[in-house]
Amino acid sequence: MTICTIGREPLFWREVPVVGQGLCPCLSSAGTIAREELEQLPIRFPSVVIEQYVIMSDHIHLLLTLRQGQSPCPTLGDVVGAYKSIVTKGINRLYGTPGTKIFQRRYYEHVIRNEEDFLSTWQYIQSNPARWREKYREP
């Protein structure tokens, strides 16, 4: 799935200059909150397995499995809603901006149907930061 910030606001990265490499991204304080809360999802929801994720400047890609037969078994909407809420509260607390919306209302989801699809999605997530660097690197 992909979750985007409102207006594609680049909240999750800050760019730092690196000699010979131009600007390189690292997680901002908001990005750190997003990462920490992602890593807490399997604790909050024992039926959730995070397979792969990447936090980009203005969106998050997440490949997860919802194990059936676990009780309680949340829906994907339950998981995403809880995640967005917790991250939004944390970022608003950090910046002193209570009530400010962080994420777009909707999210993109793709159901993995087979191993080939899983591997393709895994590769896409893994290579996303490199594609960003290629697109925005200094000339």
Image (tube, helix red, strand yellow):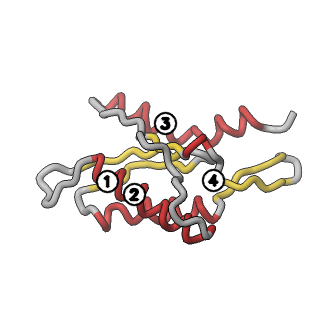
What percent of the width, then of the height, locates residue 51?
A: 38, 49
Residue positioned 48% across, 43% down in the render: 104
**Is residue 119 or residue 54 the one in the foreground?**
54
Residue 123: image tag: 3
Residue 83: image tag: 2
Give the distance between the C-alpha atoms of the residues marked 1 and 2, in whole angstroms. 6 Å
Contact between labelled residues 3 and 4, with CB atoms less than 8 Å apart: no
Contact between labelled residues 2 and 1, with CB atoms less than 8 Å apart: yes
Q: Is residue 42 left or right of residue 74?
A: right
Residue 79: image tag: 1
Q: Give the mark nearest the N terminus, 4 or 1.
A: 4
Give the distance between the C-alpha atoms of the residues marked 2 and 3, in whole angstroms. 24 Å
Quadrant of the image occupied by residue 18 = bottom right
Q: Quadrant of the N terminus?
A: top left
What percent of the width, then of the height, locates residue 32?
A: 57, 64
What percent of the width, then of the height, locates residue 47?
A: 23, 57
Instruction: Give amino acid for label 4.
Output: Leu
Instruction: Give amino acid for label 3.
Output: Gln
Residue positioned 63% across, 53% down in the render: 11
Q: Nearer the viewer, mark 3 or mark 1?
A: 1
Instruction: Give amino acid for label 1.
Output: Val
Q: Quadrant of the C terminus?
A: top right
Contact between labelled residues 3 and 2, with CB atoms less than 8 Å apart: no
Q: Please tell me whether residue 87 is drawn above or below residue 80 in the rendered image.
A: below
